[in-house]
Amino acid sequence: MRLSLRFIIPLVLALGAIAYGVAPLVDDLTLKWFVRDLDIRTKLITSAVQEPLAAAITDDLSPRIRQQRLEAVFGRLVQDERLFAIGYCDAAGKFAYRTVTLPRDIACRPPGQPAEEGRVHTFAGGSLHVAANPLSVEGMRLGELVIVHDMSFIERRSADTKKYIVYLFTGIGAVIALITVVIAELSWRGWMAGMKALIRGQLLADFSGPRSRELGPIARDLEALVRDLEAERRMRDESQMSWVPETLRTILREDLKGDEILIVSNREPYSHVRQGDRIEVQRPASGLVTALEPVMRACSGTWIAHGAGNADREVVDAGDRLRVPPESPSYTLRRVWLGKEEEAGYYDGFANEGLWPLCHIAHTRPVFRAGDWEHYRAVNRRFAETVVAESRTPNPIVLVQDYHFALLPRMIRERLPEATIIAFWHIPWPNPEAFGVCPWRKELLEGLLGSSILGFHTQFHCNNFFDTVDRYLEARVDRETFTISCGGEPTEVHRYPISIEWPLQGLDTLPPVPECRRQVREELGLAPDVRLGVGVDRLDYTKGILERFAAIERLLEIEPRWIGHISFLQIAAPSRSSIDEYQSLDARVRAAAQRINSRFAAPGCQPIVLKVEHHDAERVYRHYRAADFCFVSSLHDGMNLVAKEFVATREDERGVLILSQFAGAARELPEALIVNPYDTEQCAAAVRDALTMPPEEQRARMRSMRALLQEFNVYRWAGRMLLDAARNRNRRRLSRTSRPFASAALGP
Ligand code: F6P
């Protein structure tokens, strides 16, 4: 009813306004027509009386008889009910005859004045039409006939016309209103239902549900608009925010309303290692840990990881927990214990001999063993149980890290359906053909699609993932909304390039760059004219350590002037050393270093200085600062944080970064000297260019890279995921508390 009134009242008002606006126009028009009719009528009357009048005037008659004749002529005329009065002006311009009704203020026109059309004469009693038509017989002017018509009949007709117009418009209005109301009522219900469903997020949440045909395109447009606005808002917000730890805390407090955060990774941020009767705390050489630790320090929460240190059990409480970081505890580390066999199957076997080479195109054949797969599944299940045990709420935010836990998202989803699960894949995702060789490809994909959000470092890896799912699963892959639906909630797949904290923790306690340089060079025994290059990696075949050595060797071959003037320090943290491939790499790297050193040794300058040992962050930063260039030559790498760390430590804006085109970081740091590590000549030339680059150019490149890293730091990486998680939770909450869109659209 309210809806009907909403339509009818404005319509009636509009039509009323039209009717009252139109009526005077119609009035004016009809008056003109009637006046013209009266003009014609007076002319007809004049010509009708001309002859008898001429006879009465021109005949030789006594005045009395003439008067009688005139009265007889006019007497017949005034019987016409519309004729109000009549008068006859003689040739001298005086009334020779006038009826008593002729108003006194109507006078004869003086002789010689030209004739006029009839005019409207208004007086107190109404309006009259007055016309004075000349009379003549055979060229002789006899005077004028003044004919006055009563116009009251016109006013009566005009009033009638006005009435009919208002009736007509009101009638039309009523019909239009009725039709409009019926149509509006019908479509309004559909619209309202559609809009409600859109607002509830139902449409955004589920593209596959039935929806009314006429609302489909509109809904799609609105969805696209919402997506654009969201993306725009995110971009705007992101660029306006300054990304510091407090920003993450604000997101947690305001966007996530203090919801619980859990991180799951294989590698723990701190491990405890027994050294004689002392227990030492170690931070592992892991990009993942480097990135997530500052995030966790900012967010608190619980980090669940494999307790791999030989003294780890000695320092935990009864619930296998401890507070870290040791110097200022701010979050909980929950350790999960694995047996030797389990570790060998899940970590060494399936994760590092299977998935690692599968995802990295480094020409190492992946090995898949059914036994390893069983362990991988079992360990994923164990971590899922730990997540459930550690979560205090039914809907925590769980950040699942890396290829060790591809099955975990689905397993958590089954136990905690309300959880927001963000899985981040820290290594590259290969193309469908490469991934397809895995015998458990389907299970891995389904496991990952238990996530609410799945992140990769680059869009290229996201696209490979879309292609892989498209190829091997019955799933709905929507590249426009970046979502994949494979039963249950859809998974959003986005690019989140990982980064480092800015400023790097511990940098402020380091000596200034010249002092670091002095110390390191002294340690290495370098003569003042020796230039220093540095490489810092886990000892892994994907890092291109041999290719890097080959480039140094080639430079010394083609430009011998550098012999004795360049030393390359390779810090290689031992890694996965129980795997054959890694043992063989260790041997090959050592042999290559030896060979090059024996070829190009010079007093006080070893071309390659190889240190296969763990260096803590502070020592690594010192070496970065001391170096003239840093060489990152990964054969394939998700991101590579070494490249970013090197730049972050160079507050002096000096030093050159040589960076592989196959590391994700190359997309963000084009000011580095970008190389193909398989092209030895090109890499050798890049080393030469780095050694000869003028300081101004070094500064310009370094400044630009530092500006980027300052802005795109790890807080932004985590913040973007958390903001997306907040949005995702909001949508799910709305869609759960609202009626399903389809039934609303089809209802009465
Ligand atoms: O690159 C993937 C990754 O998980 C990194 O995040 C990390 O640097 C490395 O592998 C750690 O390897 P691991 O834990 O086997 O020593």
Image (cartoon, grey):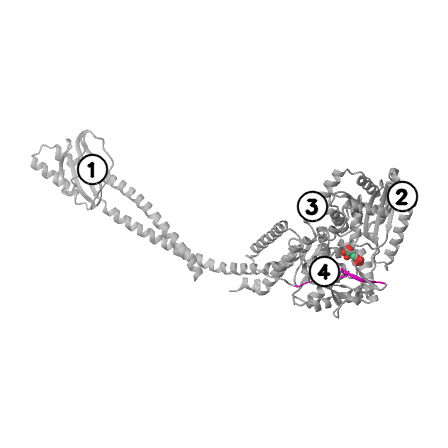
User: Is residue 267 shown in magenta?
Assistant: yes
Q: CA distance from mark 2 to mark 3?
A: 37 Å
Q: Specify the label residue 604 is tagged with.
A: 2
Question: Whole-Å distance between the Cαs marked 3 and 1?
Answer: 103 Å
| Residue shown at 83% from the left, 44% from the top | 532
The one nearer the camera, 678 or 209, is 678
Where residue 264 sits in the image (x, y, percent)?
73, 62
What numbered label is drawn on residue 739? Answer: none
Q: Is residue 394 or residue 732 the one in the foreground?
A: 394
* Residue 328 numbered tag: 4
Residue 368, horizontal then vertical, whole percent: 82, 61
Query: Which is more foreground, mark 3 or mark 1?
Result: 3
Rounded to the nearest whole Å, what is the CA distance between mark 4 and mark 3? 30 Å
What residue is disc 3 on? 707
**Distance (Cα) linking label 4 and label 2:** 43 Å
Q: Which stretch appears magenta?
A: 260-275
Q: Earlier in the sequence, mark 2 or mark 3?
A: 2
Of the residues under marks 4 and 2, which one precedes in the sequence?
4
For the residue labelled by badge 1, is the local secondary structure a helix, a strand or a loop? helix
Kindly report which numbered mark, 4 or 1, lies closer to the viewer in this rendering. Answer: 4
